[in-house]
Image: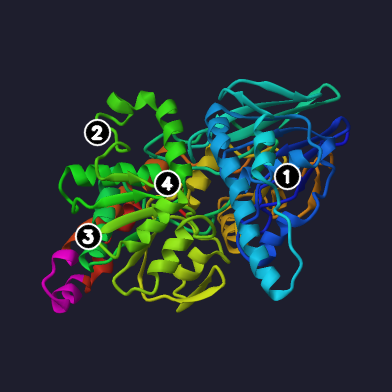
Amino acid sequence: MALSLTFHGAAGTVTGSCFRIRTGDGDLLIDCGLFQGTKTVKELNYRPFPFKPSAVKAVLLTHAHIDHSGLLPKLVRQGFKGRIHATAGTADLLAYMLPDSGYIQETEVERLNRRNRQRGRPAVEPIYTQEDAQAAIRHLHAVDYGEWVKVMPGIRARFWQAGHILGSASVELEVTRGGTAETILFSGDLGPGGKSFHADANGPARPDWMVLETTYGNRERVEVGEAERQALLRGEVRAALATGGTLLIPAFAVERTQELLYDLHRLFDRGEIPLVDVFLDSPLADAVTGVFRRHLADLGPGGFGGAGDPFARPNLRRVRSAAESQKLNAIKGGAIIMAASGMCDAGRIRHHLKNHLWRPEATVLLVGYQAPGTLGHLLQQGAPSVRIHGEEIAVRARIRSLDVYSGHADRSSLLAWVAARQGVGRGLFLVHGEEEARAGLRDALLRRGWDPALIRLPELDEVADLTAAAPSKAPDGPPRLEPETVAAGQDWHNRYAAFLLELHRALDAAPDDAAREALLRGVGDRLPQAEARRTE
């Protein structure tokens, strides 16, 4: 029986995750995500599927983020009749996220068509509607972590914790052909470990094939604990409010918003930041919070380790209607406004940016990955002006980034996860990353002894024939990191993070520029030294 894997998204870009397994019995999709980023990339959402949706027997979802799930309503609209298998957490999140995405498609197109009428251009149709989203939800089938589920003739699947967001999973496929079984492991998006709301990523050992995300494949981040993370947020909040302006936080409705509210809750309770109003201007984030409550009862009293409920504070204001959101325009300072989307590419945050970006006293705090071509990426890169809703807006606000809330594993964490899988039998495909990220992770793997013939960087719509002969490789696979090496690297991470935090506090307390310059002189000589450094 022939077996192939086609990459219909997340190949040379971060978004649009969609991988198709084809056997003699039909097609199977892993994810069916929306493309996000530049106009050129977004145009891919409007193209016909490069396969027949009616020929797809089932879909397996790694998690609920829209770049992995956002084209499911289009798939159903165009003829898909099968089941969409996902963890219970993912299914519960999608009950809110897909209709919200449909609403965004409708409102964005409505706004565009108003401009098109003024310019004499033809009207366009949304990719899908809220009604299409509701139809897709009816195809969801919740599965448990660790349990095999038969998804089509000759193929069964098992979901593993991916540690990325609530419900996220790596998906293991077992394909039986001619009495012989082989495995394909799709990593999905992997978390960095140590997240507030779920366990760390795991997975099966030594799959035949692996499809691995590379979002941060060429980047390292200092791993910080809860106390350090909250200290960094405290510094940003204090600095923003000291200017007298409003602090805007573009945040993804799932996971990022809940983590931020938890950390703000702890900082408020300890009196470490001014007790200002926090406006959660996202009906989706509010609904998602209810999903978290249902799935996180094992975190301790109140569901949050005895810290009380961070989503029931008296200074947390839920903003539900569009009219309530518009009233926030009257706020000129002394408040925190949190709204989606995290890359500033859609949703209510764009209205707030339009209202505040030109104010020098305002602050925008970016707390996640900003894909090239998104508004968030333009702001992060220092654009002097941006275009929002057809208007040119000057950027005079403070633009800050805090890269301690990422839901993605960095290069070292990706390498450690791969090492724990003990190699692959036949091939590794690097996906879900920009070209520099994919190349960076490939080079790191080669330095660890991987056979170049095993590693592939597929392009959009490229077909990989999995029936072809396997490349030559010793049966023991790539070398595995010893536990002592991993422990030494983690120790280096921890000491480096502590050093940076101490330096950050000292710089904050310095009385003048001269004192700060004195602190910065010779920093390199005081860094944690090579005896405990990570191995490359």
* Number of residue marks: 4
Q: Is residue 401 visible?
A: no
Q: Are marks 4 and 3 in contact (CB under 8 Å)?
A: no
Q: Residues within 10 Å of mark 1 (few under 14, many from 20)?
A: many
Q: Which image quarter is the N terminus in?
A: top right
The residue beneath circle 1 is 74
Label 4, label 3: how far apart the Cα atoms are: 20 Å
The residue beneath circle 4 is 256
Residue type at numbered disc 1: Lys
Front residue of this view, candidates 140 and 504: 140
Label 2, label 1: how far apart the Cα atoms are: 42 Å
Q: Which residues are magenta?
A: 507-519
**Which numbered mark, 1 or 3, is in the foreground of this view?**
1
Lower position in the chain sequence, tag 1 or tag 3: 1
The residue beneath circle 3 is 238
Front residue of this view, candidates 267 and 152: 267
Image side of residue 17 versus residue 482, left or right? right
- Residue pictured at 47% horizontal, 56% vertical: 348
Image side of residue 25 versus residue 86, left or right? right
Residue type at numbered disc 2: Ala
The residue beneath circle 2 is 307
Lower position in the chain sequence, tag 4 or tag 1: 1
Image side of residue 496 versus residue 9, left or right? left
Lower position in the chain sequence, tag 2 or tag 3: 3
SS label for mark 4: helix
- Residue pictured at 84% horizontal, 39% vertical: 467
Would you say residue 516 sits in the magenta stretch? yes
Q: Is residue 379 visible?
A: yes
Label 4, label 2: how far apart the Cα atoms are: 18 Å
Label 4, label 1: how far apart the Cα atoms are: 27 Å
Q: Position of residue 140 (x, y in %)?
A: 65, 29
